[in-house]
Image: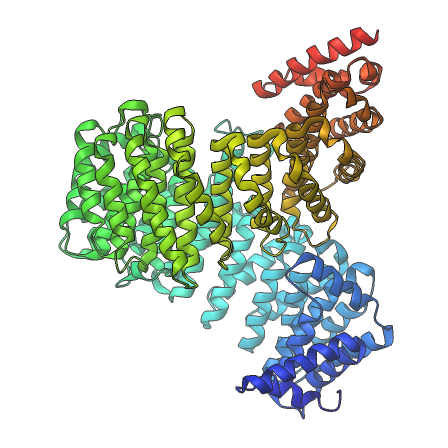
């Protein structure tokens, strides 16, 4: 195979599918049968300057894919396979790769750079390939520019792939020195400068120590500012990308550079090409994000001695920053709103203006209003659109008091513009702005409502009329109606929308049937709005909501009859619509009976959706079945034999883990609806869940709800759970051990750990409550010491969030309540029974206090009985 690898690689790119498929199969077999020879022949191919460019490039790509994968379990497998290869073979592969950095072929060098970084990410944490960084640093001093460029690329990829704690500070300093020198004006080759600037972007995460040193930081910043003025567009763009990252990583170090930041960004935004100007605006958005986070964290109680300092850079820059952003709003492109992926200067400027408004609140209003007043009725459409966009952008941030009068005054103008303006983009932005008004300045929390019974009818007339407009305007009108309905969610029986409910529903259904409903996400927007209108409707419109059921079912039936791939999304939307209707009507007795008449037909349709290939449709069908089970209660049992195979299939669906996760949630719904009637199906469900939890392929996000599901099942079947204890309890215990003493600064990992803890505790809680008052409760006694030990460990860890704290103190109460005097002395001796319970009783969170009060009573009964 090694002899003919060139030909096989070329065949794998053939236009003839038979030739291509055979070659791909050959490569797959070669990899599986002899990995050492496979990686060696690929790296030799990549390094050989005599070979065709196409075969070399593909060799490098396949080599990279043999080291890395998106799925976590597959990546671990590939990492282990590489580490277990013979050291001499790995040495030859690495030697070929380093040699390829000297190749004159750009694609070969570029691919080699990426593969070297992948191998480094596997080997450096295991203290292997220690000479790599020094070899690369030696290459940077080679006279040939192409070698320098490839080496800087490699250093950049390496910094992206490798965790900063596996490279010692001395080497970090050398990497940064090499990279920053490659960026300077003295470097004559622009390709080298570009590679160096991109490498610095990736290396910034390594530079904490360097950014803490004033001299080193000043030097790095000066070189970046110089690069923002380079004659090459790509270098200028990459330099601004560095500044964007620095703003979020080293916000607290920006103070002395703000003057320079403003002057280089103003120049770029006003004079430079769009890719550079966009990054310059992104820099200000990035500073806004940091300040919003800091101020949010302190919930408005920010003070100078808080842990994180807010330097109010945006507030200080306002007088110059806002006019610069307003100028960008006038740089619209024709029909920009028709292109879904569009991102241009005016969009970036408006987005940044919105972030500025969120950062500084009321202060933005007087700076933007003159621009709006000056341009809102100008004959040029660009000026009207920019004024409207500016208005919509600043609605989130300032206080309602500051905006209410302005918005009341503007509302009738906006409604007239949406009806009469001759320009589509102006109408599109006007409808979007109305949506923002309804989102942020409408609802039960408003002291002085902007929307009154008097103007509500006019607003609806305009929105329903605009739903017949071109797709992009109609889509924004649907969005505005969505927020209008949401604002009346708590209006009770007298919602101003109720008299128009039928008109609204008919108008939305008409939109879904438009021939052009596939454009601008229009059909999806109409269904999402219909769902929200139904969700926020009142009991007086229940008969109309019920009339929707056969209509939506007929649509779903029609889409199932016509086999087309693109119908998956539509089926998902229709199932989502039925779910909302079932939830709405199932919550009150008279309407519940009416909706359940359609149960058989609905279940038949939902089950048919599972034969489509769309994961999104499967998720929505599962959720709808969960809602139907909740509404039907024990009567749902008649559907379970027919539905069970799909439930099992959902629990087995590792690939589409969201489907798996939702199916677990549906098991919980079924447990609550059917209670002990679910018992005959529990062996299959428990077997599948235990199998899932033992698998390394299961996405981690599914594990917390799966553990919690043990509790749902135990609550439903009570002492019938006894036969599962020998499987479930050890699994809970080993998972519990993994969630204590988690030392990490990584917020994602901590958040997941808390979700896992909560799932485990919910399982314990459900199991304990399920066995309460049962003769078999003593079966839980052997597990009580482990549960108390877990509660102690969690308390001593001190990193539980409020949800976990509440569930944990609840479990303490469940333990005392179910096992009584048998655990009384254990609880008295535990940290959980004393300090943890005491702290929860004094908590400022009333939900934690409630749980703790109940736990105190239960513990009191258990300990007095044991005394």
Quarter that holds the N terminus? bottom right
Q: Is residue 200 left or right of residue 573?
A: right
Q: How is the image coloured?
A: rainbow
Q: Nearer the viewer, residue 269 or 628?
A: 628
Q: Is residue 270 above or below residue 51?
A: above
Q: Residue furthest bottom?
A: 50
Q: Residue 379 sits in which quadrant?
A: bottom left
Residue 287 appears anywhere in the view = no
Residue 488 position within the rendered picture, expressed as x and y whole percent measured from the top left = 32, 30
Q: Is residue 278 left or right of residue 867?
A: left
Residue 722 position within the rendered picture, expressed as x and y whole percent measured from the top left = 76, 31
Residue 73 position within the rendered picture, expressed as x and y whole percent measured from the top left = 71, 57
Q: Is residue 227 above or below residue 281?
A: below
Q: Is residue 582 left or right of residue 53?
A: left
Residue 463 appears anywhere in the view = yes
Quarter that holds the C terminus? top right
Q: Nearer the viewer, residue 277 or 539?
A: 539
Q: Is residue 290 left or right of residue 100?
A: left
Q: Residue 32 sits in which quadrant?
A: bottom right
Q: Is residue 445 above or below residue 608?
A: above
Q: Is residue 777 above or below residue 561?
A: above
């Amino acid at each position: 195979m090694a002899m003919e690898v060139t030909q096989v690689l070329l065949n794998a790119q053939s236009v003839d599918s038979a030739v291509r498929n055979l070659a791909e199969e050959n490569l797959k077999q070669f990899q599986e049968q002899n990995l050492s020879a496979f990686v060696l022949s690929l790296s030799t191919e990549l390094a050989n300057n005599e070979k065709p460019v196409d075969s070399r490039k593909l060799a490098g790509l396949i080599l990279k894919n043999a080291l890395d994968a998106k799925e976590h379990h597959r990546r671990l497998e590939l990492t282990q396979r590489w580490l277990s290869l013979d050291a001499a073979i790995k040495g030859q592969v690495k030697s070929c790769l380093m040699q390829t950095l000297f190749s004159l072929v750009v694609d070969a060098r570029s691919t080699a750079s990426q593969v070297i970084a992948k191998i480094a990410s596997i080997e450096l944490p295991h203290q292997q390939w220690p000479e790599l960084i020094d070899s690369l640093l030696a290459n940077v001093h080679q006279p040939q520019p192409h070698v320098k460029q490839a080496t800087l690329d490699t250093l950049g990829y390496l910094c992206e792939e490798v965790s900063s704690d596996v490279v010692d500070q001395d080497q970090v300093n050398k990497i940064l020195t090499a990279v920053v020198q490659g960026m300077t004006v003295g470097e004559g080759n622009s390709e080298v400068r570009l590679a160096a600037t991109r490498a610095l972007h990736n290396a910034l995460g390594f530079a904490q120590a360097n950014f803490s040193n004033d001299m080193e930081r000043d030097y790095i910043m000066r070189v970046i500012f110089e690069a923002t003025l380079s004659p090459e567009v790509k270098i200028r763009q990459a330099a601004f990308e560095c500044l964007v990252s620095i703003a979020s990583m080293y916000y607290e170090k920006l103070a002395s550079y703000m003057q320079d930041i403003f002057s280089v960004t103003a120049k770029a935004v006003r004079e430079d090409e769009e890719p550079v100007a966009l990054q310059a605006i992104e820099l200000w958005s990035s500073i806004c994000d940091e300040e919003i986070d800091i101020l949010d964290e302190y919930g408005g109680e920010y003070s100078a001695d808080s842990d994180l300092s807010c330097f109010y850079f945006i507030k200080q820059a306002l007088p110059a920053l806002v006019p610069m952003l307003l100028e960008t709003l006038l740089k619209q492109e024709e029909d920009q709103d028709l292109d879904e992926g569009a991102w241009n200067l005016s969009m970036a400027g408006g987005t940044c203006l919105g972030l500025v408004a969120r950062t500084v609140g009321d202060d933005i209003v007087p700076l933007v209003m003159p621009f709006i007043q000056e341009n809102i009725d100008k004959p040029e459409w660009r000026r009207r659109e920019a004024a409207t966009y500016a208005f919509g952008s600043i609605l989130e941030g300032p206080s309602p008091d500051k905006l209410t009068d302005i918005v009341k005054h503007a509302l009738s103008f906006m409604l007239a513009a949406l009806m009469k303006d001759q320009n589509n983009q102006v109408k599109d932005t006007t409808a979007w702005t109305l949506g923002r008004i309804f989102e942020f300045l409408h609802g039960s929390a408003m002291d002085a409502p902007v929307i009154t019974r008097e103007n509500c009818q006019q607003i609806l007339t305009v929105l329903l009329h605009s739903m017949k407009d071109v797709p992009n305007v109609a889509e924004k009108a649907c969005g505005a109606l969505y927020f209008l309905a949401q604002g009346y969610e708590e209006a009770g029986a007298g919602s101003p929308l109720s008299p128009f409910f039928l008109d609204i529903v008919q108008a939305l259904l008409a939109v879904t049937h438009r021939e052009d409903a596939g454009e601008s996400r229009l059909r999806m927007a109409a269904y999402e709005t219909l769902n929200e209108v139904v969700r926020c409707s009142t009991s007086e419109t229940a008969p109309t909501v019920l009339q929707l059921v056969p209509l939506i079912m007929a649509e779903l039936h029609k889409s199932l009859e016509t086999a087309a791939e693109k119908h998956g999304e539509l089926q998902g939307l229709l199932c989502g619509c039925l779910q909302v209707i079932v939830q709405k009507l199932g919550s009150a007795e008279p309407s519940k009976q009416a909706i359940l008449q359609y149960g058989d037909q609905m279940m038949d349709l939902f089950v048919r959706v599972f034969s489509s290939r769309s994961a999104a449709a499967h998720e929505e069908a599962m959720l709808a079945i969960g809602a139907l089970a909740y509404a039907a209660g024990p009567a749902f049992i008649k559907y379970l034999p027919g539905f069970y195979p799909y439930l099992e299939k959902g629990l087995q669906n590792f690939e589409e883990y969201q489907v798996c996760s939702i199916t677990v949630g549906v098991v919980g719904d079924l447990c609550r609806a059917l209670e002990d009637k679910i018992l005959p199906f529990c062996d299959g469900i428990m077997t599948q869940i235990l199998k899932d939890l033992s698998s390394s392929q299961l996405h981690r996000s599914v594990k917390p709800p799966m553990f919690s599901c043990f509790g749902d099942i135990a609550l439903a079947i009570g002492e019938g759970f006894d036969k599962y204890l020998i499987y479930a309890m050890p699994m809970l215990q080993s998972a519990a051990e993994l969630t204590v003493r988690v030392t990490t600064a990584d917020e994602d990992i901590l958040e997941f750990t808390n979700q896992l803890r909560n799932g485990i505790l919910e399982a314990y809680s459900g199991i304990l409550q399920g066995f309460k008052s049962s003769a078999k409760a003593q079966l839980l006694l052997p597990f009580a010491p482990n549960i108390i030990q877990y509660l102690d460990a969690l308390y001593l860890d001190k990193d539980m969030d409020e949800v976990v704290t509440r569930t944990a103190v609840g479990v303490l109460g469940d333990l005392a309540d179910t096992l009584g005097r048998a655990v009384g002395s254990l609880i008295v001796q535990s940290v959980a029974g004393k300090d943890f319970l005491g702290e929860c009783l004094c908590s400022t969170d009333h939900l934690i206090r409630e749980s703790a009060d109940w736990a105190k009573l239960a513990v009191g009964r258990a300990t007095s009985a044991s005394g």
